[in-house]
Amino acid sequence: MTIVSVEKKKKKPNYFRQVQEELGKVTWTSKKELLLCTKVVICSMFVFGLGIFGADLLIRNSLQLLNTLVGYVGG
């Protein structure tokens, strides 16, 4: 019976202590690398945004041209 009571008294692992230990193992990026990655993401978003804008203009003008041609032909 004493064996059971010893097993029950084992300390449960502390969640916050484990989180702190894991955060100590993390390799954080340097400020220079973080700024470079941020610039790359912002520039990429700008380029893709311009691409989507161009595709939108192309599709919209194509549909307007098609509508105009159908109007002339269909009368």
Image: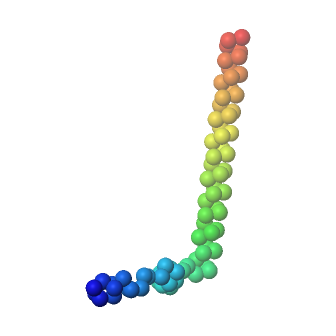
Q: Quadrant of residue 37?
A: bottom right
Report x, y in % for residue 60: 68, 34
**Residue 33 appears left or right of 25:** right
**Can residue 23 be seen here?**
no
* Residue furthest to the top: 75
Q: Residue at x 66, y 50 (%)?
A: 50
Residue 9 left/right relative to 35: left
Front-most of residues 24 and 16: 16
- Nearer the observer, 15 or 25: 15
When the figure is inspected, residue 31 is found, relative to residue 54, above or below; the finding is below
The location of residue 51, given as percent across then percent down, is 63, 48
In the rendered view, tell whether residue 65 sits above or below residue 28.
above
Which residue appears at 49% of the width and 79% of the height? 15
- Identify the residue at image location x=65%, y=37%: 58
In the displayed structure, 46 sits above or below 61; it is below
Q: Name the quadrant of the C terminus.
A: top right
The answer to whether any part of residue 16 appears in the image is: yes
Q: Nearer the viewer, residue 24 or 47?
A: 24
Look at the image and name its color scheme: rainbow
